[in-house]
Image (spheres, rainbow, N blue to C red):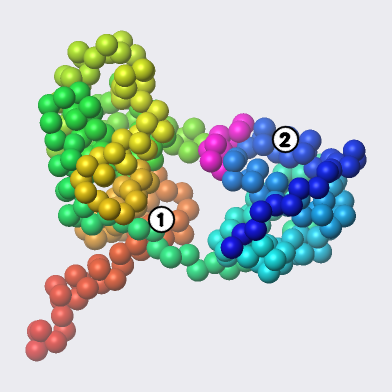
Amino acid sequence: MDQPIRLVKAPATDLWWPLWESFERSLRAEGAAGRTVDMYRDAAQVAHAFLLDRGYPLDPTAIEKRHVEEFLIHLREERGAAPATVRARFSALRRFFNFLLDEGEIEHSPMARMRGPKVDEPPPEVLSEEELIRLLRACEGRGFEERRDMALIRLMIDTGLRRFEAAGIQLTDLDLSGQQVRIVGKGGREGVAFFGTKVARDLDRYLRARARHHNAALSALWLAQKGALTGDGIHHLVQRRAKLAGIERPVWPHLLRHSFAHAMKSAGNSDEVVMTLGRWRDPKVMRRYGASAALQRARDAHRASSPGDRL
């Protein structure tokens, strides 16, 4: 298990954080997600504590390859960090040193020839069709929240929207007759998500309820009692509906995205189609999402075309 960081008072010559703050500003300017920035900062804190404890340079421009290697060994052998955690720390530091290289702060990155730790990540979880049906049934009703949650959750199931993409939708982004919605994805990239007839029906019902809401004048599509619905608000409502549905395992918004990829792959769609519809840019990430229930898809394919059954 990852052990707590042992804090040691930093010397006055500590130059780690000023450069890291510059790195974070660059990340935000590039449109990096807040979660990514937080994850990188966590890696920076752990690395800083290690360097301080060992008496190694706290000036990033003086860090050598051996320092990074010892840090990775420390994570695995002394802190008991999981392989995925070691990989995440490695990636954060490599991006930091690449930033310093691009900015002319260093001439060579100490991680230039280092390979990241290999991680055999398990496929992401997906919700079964039965669980998805139960989740939607838990949203049934004629009240404002029921109409909103039904439209929102069905839209996320049908499009694979990330919660921040869903939260950012404006009324003017929605084309109900064309069954599509403009979204702003990672890095501020604009895109279009397409949805089916049941989503269009549920959105129509929600829009009629929305017109009578006391926050109806707001430009955001999704409303809450105190204003526009936020990404955190979406997280909480998905959890609440899952609990009402009697789904005992943890359910969170991104699980709907995993389930979207699985459903599209199960329907026989190509990687290119799923990547385009889900707005993935990294084929490896898309394949990992789509592999969540590969065995189930293989079983269904075999039942449909069993060589032995044809003899």
Decide which of tag 2 and tag 1 comes sooner along the chain: 2
Q: Quadrant of residue 15?
A: top right
Q: Are marks 2 and 1 in contact (CB under 8 Å)?
A: no
Percent across and percent down for residue 168 are 39, 28
Q: Nearer the viewer, residue 284 or 137?
A: 137
Which quadrant would the N terminus be assigned to in this image?
bottom right
Determine whether, in the image, residue 31 is placed left or right of residue 109. Answer: left
Amino acid beneath label 2: Glu
Picture layout, residue 47 above or below residue 24: below
Q: Is residue 51 visible?
A: yes
Give the SS element for disc 2.
helix
Which quadrant would the C terminus be assigned to in this image?
bottom left
Give the residue at mark 1: 286
Q: Count neighbours of disc 1 (C-alpha within 10 A) and say few if under 14, some if 14 to 19, many if 20 or more.
A: some
Picture layout, residue 152 above or below residue 242: above
Q: Is residue 102 visible?
A: no
Magenta residues span 28-36
Percent across and percent down for residue 7 are 76, 48
Kindly identify the residue that appears in the image at 84 percent across and 43 percent down. Answer: 10
Amino acid beneath label 1: Met
Percent across and percent down for residue 262 are 29, 57
Q: Count neighbours of disc 2 (C-alpha within 10 A) and say few if under 14, some if 14 to 19, many if 20 or more.
A: few
Q: Quadrant of residue 150?
A: top left
Label ID, residue 21: 2
Q: Quadrant of residue 38?
A: top right
Q: Nearer the viewer, residue 249 or 304?
A: 249
